[in-house]
Structure formats: C-alpha cells, structure tokens
C-alpha cells in the first residue's frame, strides 16, 4: 500500500483533507501557547533588565564615592600647593604638619598636630597656613605637639598696621573669628579694613606675615583708648594642614663671601 502510494500518490487527496481538519486545531494550540512563550520572554527580559539596573546603580554608587574622593583629593592638593607656595615665599625653613585633634573646650582654641620633637618641633614655634599666621606651639611630645591658635584667650602676637606702621598687639578672645587690639589711642591712624601684619618684635613670629584684618574701630572720648577688633586672615577652623616655621636670627646667618651682594642691603 505504501509502495503504491509512493508511486501513484493515491493518498494525497486524503492527506489534504485531513490537513484542512487539523490546521484549525493546530492554530488553536499555537495561539494558546504563544502568550505563554511571550510571557516567558517578557519575564526573562524583565529579570535581565532589573539585574542590569541593579548593576548600574551599584556602579553609579561606586563612581559617586570615587568622585567624592577625587573632589577631596583635589581640595587637599589645592591646600598643599597653597602651603608650598607660602613656603617658597618665606625665607625660613618650613615643613607641613597635619591637624589630628581639636580641643573641644569652647573657651580654648588649641589643636594637636602630627609632628613632635623627633621632627625638631619646639615650644614657641610659629604656625602658618596659606593665608597668614595661625598661632604657636606650646607643648611638644616625641610624635605630636599641641599648638595655641591666635584666638585663644591666652595668646598674643605683636603686630603693626601695614598701611601706617602703627605697632600694636593682637590678643585672642576665645571667639573663633575675633581678636582684640587693645591700647590704641583714640586719635591713632587705624581704620576698618586695615591689614595687621606680624612686626617680628620679640623674635617669636617672623616679620611681615598677615595676621588679621581690622573689622571695628570705635572711638570713645570718655575712655583713653579706642575699641579695635580684628578678624584672623588664617582659616583657623577650616584647615587640616599647617606650616611649621623655623626662623634663624640674622646674627647667626653666615656672612656673605667677599664680592657677593647681600639680599637686604644690596651692598658689596
């Protein structure tokens, strides 16, 4: 029978009739399974998208963290370059130290730095930042030191008005942004906005460094002295690095060789 069908195709018409009957059933089966396949593909795609979104969120978080670190490093780099620029502008020997602790006493303005006697730090050594004088070292240990800032009530620094040369003393008040300048006569030539620089008197602080800007001058005829206040130019409450300074008295500096020109007088 199969041989006859293969040779003379007796069953072609029967197969055609059966296909007409089976096709609608096959179509119904395909229609019933197609949504399941689509749903499966949808779920797989959704799962893959969710996984990709989670990976992207994780990567975004890591990139944000890295960006914050880069911003912090950039800020630190700017501060260090400012300190190095200040170091180059001074004739004294300098080194950078980092602040590791701050005194929490509201009436005390002191910090701890990560340099000590092993780094040749000594009591009374001046501290600077990129803007001006910050204070001085008061206690030294082998690996750290305690420094008193300009605004500490126990601190005082000899200054002079940069515009006129008037000498005075800037004293700490305990406030983070205010210095008192006492014993200024009512008729003294000093005004708001004047810059106070270190005078170098007493040999503790190097001369010519900015200390503060005058913020208030109030004369009172009933009192012998005017009320004068100033704000430190150093960023006392916002910096992490400080500059330690070693000053060499002029009398201990080597004399120029014969034929050399001195920097101060220009004489041979």
Image: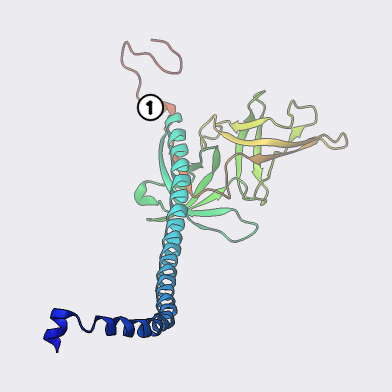
Q: Is residue 260 above or below residue 181?
A: above
Percent coordinates x, y for residue 113 in the rendering: 46, 53
Q: Is 139 placed left or right of 22 in the picture?
A: right
**Secondary structure beneath disc 1?**
loop
Along the line of sight, the residue nearer the viewer: 94 or 141 = 94
Mark 1 residue crowding within 10 angstroms, few (<14) / some (14–19) / many (20+): few
Task: Examine the rendering and report whether any part of residue 113 can be seen.
Answer: no
In this figure, what is the number of numbered marks?
Answer: 1
**Residue 209 visible within the image:** yes
Q: Which residue does the numbered mark 1 point to in the structure image? A: 253
**Toward the viewer: 106 or 34?**
34
Residue placed at 62% from the left, 33% from the top?
A: 159
Looking at the image, residue 242 lies above or below residue 164: below
Q: Is residue 46 above or below residue 105?
A: below
> Which residue shows up at 66% across the image and 35% down it?
213
Closer to the camera in the image, 209 or 234: 234
Q: Position of residue 32 (x, y in %)?
A: 43, 83
Q: Position of residue 241 (x, y in %)?
A: 47, 47
Which residue is most to the bottom?
A: 1
**Extreme-left residue of the structure:** 3
Q: Residue at x 44, y 71 (%)?
A: 46
Q: With 89 as the anchor, is 119 left or right in this view?
A: left
Task: From the viewer's side, name the closer residue of 25 and 33.
Answer: 25
Q: Position of residue 66 (x, y in %)?
A: 42, 55
Q: Where's the C terminus, which quadrant?
A: top left
Quadrant assignment for the N terminus: bottom left
* Image quadrant assignment for residue 35: bottom left
Q: Quadrant of residue 141?
A: bottom left
| Residue 102 falls left or right of residue 167 | left
């Amino acid at each position: 029978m199969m041989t006859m069908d293969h040779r003379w195709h007796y069953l072609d018409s029967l197969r055609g009739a059966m296909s007409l009957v089976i096709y609608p059933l096959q179509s119904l089966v395909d229609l019933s399974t197609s949504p399941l396949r689509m749903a499966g593909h949808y779920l797989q795609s959704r799962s893959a998208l969710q996984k990709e979104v989670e990976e992207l969120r994780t990567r975004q978080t890591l990139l944000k963290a890295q960006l914050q670190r880069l911003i912090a490093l950039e800020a630190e780099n700017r501060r260090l370059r400012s300190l190095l620029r200040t170091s180059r502008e001074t004739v004294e020997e300098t080194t950078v130290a980092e602040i590791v602790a701050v005194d929490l006493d509201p009436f005390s303005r002191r910090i701890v730095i990560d340099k000590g006697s092993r780094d040749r730090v000594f009591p009374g050594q001046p501290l600077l930042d990129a803007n001006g004088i910050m204070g001085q070292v008061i206690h030294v240990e082998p690996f750290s030191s305690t420094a008193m800032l300009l605004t500490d009530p126990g601190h005082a620094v000899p200054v002079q008005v940069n515009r006129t040369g008037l000498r005075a003393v800037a004293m700490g008040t305990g406030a983070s942004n205010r210095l008192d300048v006492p014993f200024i006569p009512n008729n003294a030539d000093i005004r708001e906005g004047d810059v106070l620089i270190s005078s170098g008197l007493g040999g503790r602080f190097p001369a010519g460094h900015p200390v503060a800007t005058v913020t208030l001058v109030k004369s009172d005829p009933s009192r012998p002295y005017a009320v004068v206040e100033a704000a430190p130019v150093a960023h006392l409450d916002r910096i992490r690095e400080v500059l330690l300074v070693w000053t060499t008295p002029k009398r201990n500096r080597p004399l120029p060789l014969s034929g050399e020109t001195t920097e101060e007088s220009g004489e041979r």
